[in-house]
Image: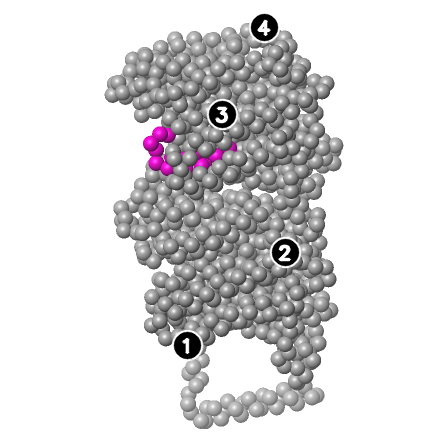
Amino acid sequence: MGMEQAWVLPAIPAVLFVVIALFNGLMPRRGDFLAILGMATVVGLVFVILVEFQGAFQGGLFTPEGANAYAFDWINIGQGFFVIEFSTYVDAITMVMLPVVTIVALMVMVYSVGYMHGEVRYGWYFAVLSLFVAAMLTLVVSGNLIQLYLAWEGVGLASYLLIGFYWERQSAAEAAKKAFITTRIGDVGLLIGIILLWRATGTFDIQEIISAATSGQIGDRYLTIAMLFLFGGAVGKSAQFPLHVWLPDAMEGPTPVSALIHAATMVVAGVYLVARFSPVYAEVLVARDVVLYTGLITAMMAASMGLVTTDIKRVLAYSTVSQLGFMFVALGVGAVGAAMFHLFTHAFFKALLFLGSGSVIHATHQQEVGALGGLRKKLPITTATFIIGSLALSGIPIFAGFFSKDEILHYVQADGGPVVYVLLAGTALLTAIYTTRLVLLTFFGEPKDHHAYDHAHESGPAMALPLIFLAVLATVAGFFVFDQVGEALGFAGGIGALVYIDHPHHFTQVDYAFAGIATLTALAGIGIGMAYWRGDARRAVQARAWAPDLHALLANRYYMDDLYQGIINRVILGAATVVAWFDKRIVNETGVDGGAQTISYLGYRLKFLQTGRIPNYALGMAVGVVALAIVAVGTRG
Amino acid sequence: MTESDGYVLLALFLVPLGTAVLLMLVPSRERAVIIGVTALSSTAMLALSLYTFASYSFAEGQQFQGVLAFTWMENMGVLGADGIQVKVGIDGITASLVLLTGIVIVPGTWVSWKVQHRTKDFFVLLYILTSGVFGVFVLLDLFFWFMAYEVALLPMYQLIAIWGSTRKEYGAMKLMMMLMAGSIFIFTVIFALYTHVGAGTFDMEVLINAQKDENFQKVFFPLVVIGCGALGAMFPFHSWSPDGHASAPTAVSMLHAGVLMKVGAFGVLRLGFQMMPEGGAFWAPALIVVGIVAALYGAISALKQTDMKLMMGFSSISHMGYVFLGLGTVNVIGWSGAVLQMTAHGLMTALFFLLIGGMYDQAHNRDIPNFSGMAKQMPIWTVFFILASLASLGLPGLSGFVAEVHIFIGAFRAYPIVGGLAVLTAAITATYLLRMLSQAFFGEMNPRWTGLKEITWAERAGATVLALAILTLGLWPSPWIDRIGPSIIQIAGVGL
């Protein structure tokens, strides 16, 4: 087992999906143990691959051989006329994704045993989780763009099925539909981008395309257009402005699903895609600037909406959108390593926060912060781990998020210009504020719904252990940047070289002044939050009274959902009405039925020629004969 | 495929024909016999078509395989030595279409066993129709080819008018009138080809390989497109399709949308592009326009439909638009996509109509707003329906994507803007299908339908056959591509 056998990783959950989906009714515990065992095996295999990958460390970079493993021709028209070849490719970017996906998936599955206990369709739930993991792993090991697209849609399908898991609720069904269609709009761009790249290079192989593009074989303007279309896919999948609207609604799904799919893994697929093509984006700076500003707008917008949202999961959803924006900003200034590092740490602390919110919802059956409060006494483990996650999200030193966010800010300051830097730092401040607000309203102050509060209690180890494990990761994952730490753990050149990809030797020292400013920003955010809310929900009402228009703007999500709904109702369904009318009235009734009626009318008229009187017919014959005679004579000349 | 396999090809259309004759001799009250005979016969057809598909493998220099000819009329009047023959033979394209027909007829037979009214007559007509479809795919003599073409159409009228629902007389009459009008064009082209080539034969191999004047091709190619396009529900000759589907009984909708519409597209390929390549090249841009307009037009119209069958009718127009778009690209990738799409759309649309029929037989209602939360009442039905929808909206891993990606790429090679619009159409398809799923299948159960039962075992089995075929083509398309691709490369006048 090594890099060349990377196809085994998605194969295991894929087989388990089929087995569990078809036979979960026959299995004890509906097959949940199978999914978890399979997942644990995959985690083990990832580390086996990681060890082999370590052996390829040379001169500060990973240069693995055999990473691009040929698999088979999926489509081959006429011996090489047109080929789509499925292959696996493992490099440093893949090696960051693999542990993230598999570890979070394993934690979420274990957690789900407790969280989903007694739910309907329990076996189906684990089957679709396995399907998701299979598709996600295929996505990150794909060496081919069509294969990547296949996996890309596969994770979308799993997301659709899981958002709509409680389909008896109309809102869940609508949210699933919205998520699928919104991301599908992005996927139109992705597929067009893929085909445009094929058209220029004649191949779908990612590495061949990158080398063709970086060696200047494709015209600049053409390449810019292709890369913008490709980015469209990332915008949809990673819920970036203007296609971010589906992610908050996706919170209709079970909470562990939100942690896995809508926080840690699927939504970072867009980041992965852009990171994968970063050498090409470095060639077309216009496209890369679009990435930068899309990320910046998204980060700011989502953070501001997180300030007023009252649903605990939706706050985290906006936070996710915002943090993904941070990653795109990093990609937009060419800091691939920083983006991947933030992806890495964010996966752990955001999954932790989601699972923590799940624990709250499980205990209280409430997810409106207005009905929570004071839960720290009832849910000590959840509270402690949630606070660790919040500190990581806010960017307080020693916690993982601090290091990665600091890196992004560092690169932005250097390469993005002062305006972008200030705006992004301001967003970091907002992050700390809304995070503090969430923690205070949920866990501190007085309980607002006593019925929910009285019945709340910490759930069993299946839910507590993943929280603790992820809390540990959210604390230590940041230290991985330091080469000394990595080497102490037995990684050649430190883990930083692995996560950091193209900037391997940057992280031996800390810029204390810069880190100090970032820390102060985060502390200021927490301070503002604590000073304002102090666990008092009434403050929210005051905030609304203080700036009602601003509050309405944020609470209504900048009216973008309304705008889209308006476009769908007025423009798209309007066009459909016109076309359907045209088809019914013009094509069918006028053209087809009208044609038929004309003929039947003519038949009605002409039948009167059939008089039944001999003289009429004789006259007709005579006229005919004369006419024929004239024609005959005329043509003979 | 050897020469003796020609007898298998003969059997393909003689088995359903023979079954129809046999059924005529069975007294109508003997339902068990009728069911037994049709069960055997449909299984035999599936086995024969599987054998045909499996034994075909492309060989250089062989335009058609399994060629077998019996002369019927020779040296009479204008007829030459090979005048009119019963001649069979297939290439990779027809191999895949034969398999499609075999796969669709089996579930079509199974679900028709619940027809109570004049069961025997129903199957007689259904099998005559099937015989015609197989005939179109395997016959290589234009005289009998056209006969098979007509035989495939005529039973539609009775099948819809007698066993249909809603506005069945109107639907049947409209369908028949429009398709017959199309036949006139085809008839004209056949005789024009015969006289223009002047070899005194209707042998398609001779006619394909003969030299034809360029102006002749330019004049007669559009007639083929109009004539066959009407059967393929090509915009603007599609009007019979939604009404015809809406009023047809389940098995007829399945066969019609699943296979007969493909006969139309296949006619454009064989009678049009293969006979008149230069005319095809000349008119290809028009075909592209018609194709992309149909794809968008059908999809946008489908957004507004509330009757499930009407929605599927417009959806079919949209998907057949892809086929004509693929044909219009005149390159190997686009054409492969067009032929793959015939199979892909045939499978998923047959599954759709099977499922809608299974529900309509109980509810006597197909209006989407009347339903809600059906997943609770009919979970198995819902699973199959979701699968068909996902295939239809082009989800990778299912049949639709394999075909569509070829068509998109082919279109991008020809005209990038059209390719972009085609990809966009796939997003509109997702919109109308997911809107229907969300409204009718999810949400709270509408108590009005608590009496509905899950689909019958025959329907489940039939749906399973189609679902497996959809998955196989989607995940492992090589068997189809290995047969279709080389045959297309061989057709003259086509570049990459």
> At label 2, which amino acid type do we have?
Ile
- Nearest the viewer among A585 and B96 is B96
Element type at mark 1: helix
Report the disc number at residue A191: none
4 and 3 marks in contact (CB < 8 Å): no
Picture residue at 41% right of the left edge, 90% below the top = A612
What crowding class fits label 1: few (fewer than 14 Cα within 10 Å), some (14-19), or many (20 or more)?
A: few
Pointer 4 indicates a residue of which chain?
Answer: A
User: Left of A625 or right of it: where is B492?
Assistant: right
Q: Nearer the viewer, mark 4 or mark 1?
A: 1
- Nearest the viewer among A39 and A328 is A39
> At label 3, which amino acid type do we have?
Val
Name the residue that disc number 3 marks: A104
Residue A102 % position (x, y): 52, 27
Q: Quadrant of the C terminus of chain A?
A: bottom right
Residue A137 % position (x, y): 55, 32
Report the disc number at residue B25: 1
Q: Nearer the viewer, mark 3 or mark 2?
A: 3
Picture residue at 64% right of the left edge, 78% below the top = B71
Pointer 3 indicates a residue of which chain?
Answer: A
Cα distance between the residues tagged 2 and 4: 67 Å
> At label 1, which amino acid type do we have?
Leu
Q: Nearer the viewer, mark 4 or mark 3?
A: 3
Name the residue that disc number 4 marks: A513
Q: Quadrant of residue B200?
A: bottom right
Q: Which residues are magenta?
A: A116-135
Q: Is residue A419 above or below residue B98?
A: above
2 and 1 marks in contact (CB < 8 Å): no
